[in-house]
Image (cartoon, rainbow, N blue to C red):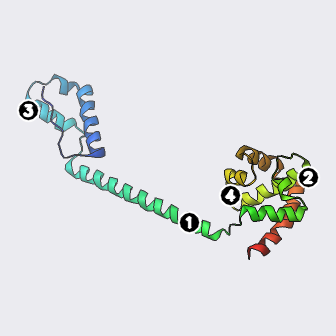
Amino acid sequence: MQVPEKPRNLDGIAAQELARNKAYWERRSPIYRRTETKEAIKSTFQRKSTLPTEERLMEIRLEEQQRRWFNKVHQHLTEMQIEARQAEIKRIKIGTIINVVCDVCRVNKNILLSPAREREYIIPRAAIVMIAREQGRSFPQIGRMMNRDHSSIIHLYKKYGNRSEVLDIIDRVKPRLAEDFE
């Protein structure tokens, strides 16, 4: 039995589609398996085949090129949007946030950043975390500035983020940060 050869100049999806269709008809078509002569095989293959024509192969190549171009453009636009958003966000340094919260809460900065676990230090720490997260800082960044692991910062954020004491401190700190930033 003679099987038509795959054209040599195909690439990418077109070659895979051709091989898949060829294998399908070799397995499925009883007429294709039973015929003995070259002419019968060729005519059966041409009649039953779903192999892509040269025009279809060109369309597939064009679609691949368009898809690649679209992905590049989309990635570039996404990067530009991220840069624009970051330019819009006025980032305040975490050190500045810590200093202002210490002033508002009348807490010593060294004690606030120490391993102390008293409630009077936890609430200002939670306020710092909430404000820093609003500024777009990551948990690891905040943790490094507060001498803590990022998982401790996540815990503060989840457990103390909605408490009224923390929200009151944030309301008192934000105007001061706005003054200091300008």
Q: In which quadrant will I find the C terminus?
A: bottom right
- The residue located at (88%, 65%) in the rendering is 104
The CA span between labels 3 and 2 is 92 Å
Q: Residue furthest front?
A: 110
State the image quarter where residue 98 is shown: bottom right
For residue 137, which numbered disc appears in the image? 4
The CA span between labels 1 and 2 is 38 Å
**Amino acid at circle 3:** Glu
For residue 83, which numbered disc appears in the image? 1
Comparing marks 1 and 2, which lies closer to the viewer? Answer: 2
The CA span between labels 3 and 1 is 64 Å
**Amino acid at circle 1:** Glu
> Reading the chain from its start, which is encountered first: label 3 or label 2?
3
The CA span between labels 4 and 2 is 24 Å
**Amino acid at circle 2:** Glu
Query: Residue 139: where, in percent of width, then height?
Result: 69, 51
- The residue located at (51%, 61%) in the rendering is 78
For residue 39, which numbered disc appears in the image? 3
In this figure, which residue is indicated by the disc labeled 2?
120
> Reading the chain from its start, which is encountered first: label 3 or label 1?
3
Q: Is residue 101 left or right of residue 149?
A: right
State the image quarter where residue 26 is shown: top left
